[in-house]
Amino acid sequence: MVKIGVITGSTRDARVNKQVSEYILEKAKHVEGAEFELVDIKEYDLPMFNEAMPPAMANMNYDKDETTRWSEKIDSLDGFVFVTPEYNNAITPSLKNAIDYIGPEWGNKAAGIVGYGSTLGVAATLNLRAILSNINVATVAPVGGFSLFTDFEEMSTFRPSEIHNPTIQAVLETTVAWSKGLKSIRA
Ligand SMILES: Cc1cc2nc3c(=O)[nH]c(=O)nc-3n(C[C@H](O)[C@H](O)[C@H](O)COP(=O)(O)O)c2cc1C
């Protein structure tokens, strides 16, 4: 059994992210071999990164309580599904900030990515892949991509087409399989 966090990718009050993340969590209930939980970066309320040491050198000892709380949550997980919108062809500053906050807690784990935006979040997904590769997170090949035009009503209420089901299933199942594999190298 592996533990997988569905990580939200947006913190603005009017975000659609929570709807998409909760939908992914619901789909994940039918995937065997893993426990999924929602990890909402908004709840961790991380200010702009201001630790004294770069996370790669901090040895998981942090100045601030909010960093330790975030570190312990990510450290407790075996893998992740990032649900990311696209802001100016990239992930949001809040998601990048949350990733930057800590280092080894992410490492040697697997991740799936589900993007959304006017162009299915493709640029944000590629941006996130490059970032995650730098902290030893292995991203699986299947990628979810929802359209603001066809998977949302008035770009605000999530009504996903069923056409995405096989891809989302593949994202979740491959993330679980890779998370199990990578758990063995962390032992
Ligand atoms: C600052 C900003 C930049 C954006 N840039 C893009 C973009 O480059 N490509 C895109 O497809 N959508 C872009 N969008 C549209 C967002 O994908 C859309 O607003 C989405 O709902 C944002 O996710 P959220 O509501 O969960 O925060 C942008 C939105 C914002 C607020």
Image (cartoon, rainbow, N blue to C red):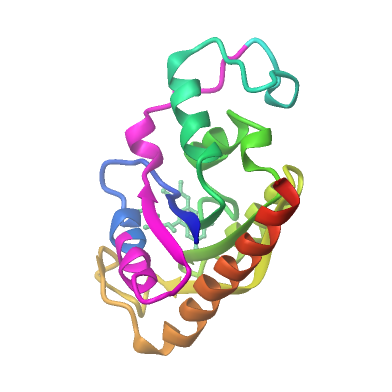
User: Quick check: can you spot residue 85?
Assistant: no
Displayed-image quarter of ligand 1 = bottom left
The residue at 36%/59% (across/down) is 21
The residue most toward the bottom is 163
Name the spot of residue 46 as percent of width and height, x first: 43, 26
Name the spot of residue 133 as percent of width and height, x first: 75, 51
Q: Looking at the picture, does residue 109 appear above or below residue 64?
A: below
Taking the magenta stretch, the answer to whether it contains residue 25 is: yes
Position of residue 69 in the picture relative to residue 161 (left or right): right
User: Quick check: can you spot residue 167?
Assistant: yes
The residue at 46%/36% (across/down) is 73
Residue closer to the observer: 75 or 167? 75
Give the magenta range.
Answer: 22-51
Residue closer to the observer: 34 or 107? 34
The residue at 37%/28% (across/down) is 45
Q: Looking at the picture, does residue 65 appear above or below residue 97?
A: above
Position of residue 76 in the picture relative to residue 44 (left or right): right
